[in-house]
């Protein structure tokens, strides 16, 4: 018996459930541009019975920067 389709169907169901559960939390973590990321990883161990695990991770990208100018000590300063 081919278990590919039942495994795929179950994985899709798990993905839907995790998205429904964590969508608001991910959206609330959006950066100032409104970007947020949800990563989904599906792991399968074929066997009898086959094992399926779907992992959801939410990430927020934080960017920060500092800009400055450093004068070359070898250059003469103009007044």
Image: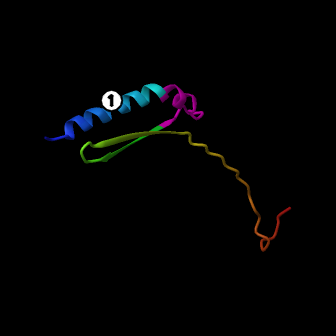
Q: In the picture shown, does residue 43 fall above or below 76? A: above
Q: Residue furthest right?
A: 79
Secondary element type, mark 1: helix
Tell me the crowding category of disc 1: few under 14, some 14 to 19, or many 20 or more residues within 10 angstroms, Cα based.
few
Quadrant showing the C terminus: bottom right
Kindly identify the residue that appears in the image at 70 percent across and 52 percent down.
67
Residue nearest the observer in this picture, 75 or 68: 68
Kindly identify the residue that appears in the image at 33 percent across and 41 percent down.
52
Kindly identify the residue that appears in the image at 29 percent across and 33 percent down.
10
Residue nearest the observer in this picture, 44 or 76: 44
Q: Is residue 33 magenta?
A: yes
Image coords of residue 18 (percent x, y): 43, 31
Kindly identify the residue that appears in the image at 49 percent across and 29 percent down.
22
Residue nearest the observer in this picture, 37 or 33: 37
Image coords of residue 12 (percent x, y): 31, 32
Identify the residue under disc 1: 13
**Residue segment shown in magenta:** 22-37
Q: Residue furthest bottom?
A: 74
Q: In the picture provided, is 16 more to the left or to the right than 27? A: left
Q: In the picture provided, is 44 more to the left or to the right than 17? A: left
């Amino acid at each position: 018996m081919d278990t590919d389709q039942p495994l795929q169907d179950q994985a899709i169901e798990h993905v839907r459930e995790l998205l429904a559960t964590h969508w608001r939390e991910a959206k609330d973590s959006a950066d100032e541009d409104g970007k947020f990321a949800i990563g989904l990883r599906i792991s399968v161990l074929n066997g009898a019975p086959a094992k399926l695990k779907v992992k959801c991770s939410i990430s927020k990208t934080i960017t920060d920067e500092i800009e400055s100018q450093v004068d070359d000590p070898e250059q003469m300063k103009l007044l």
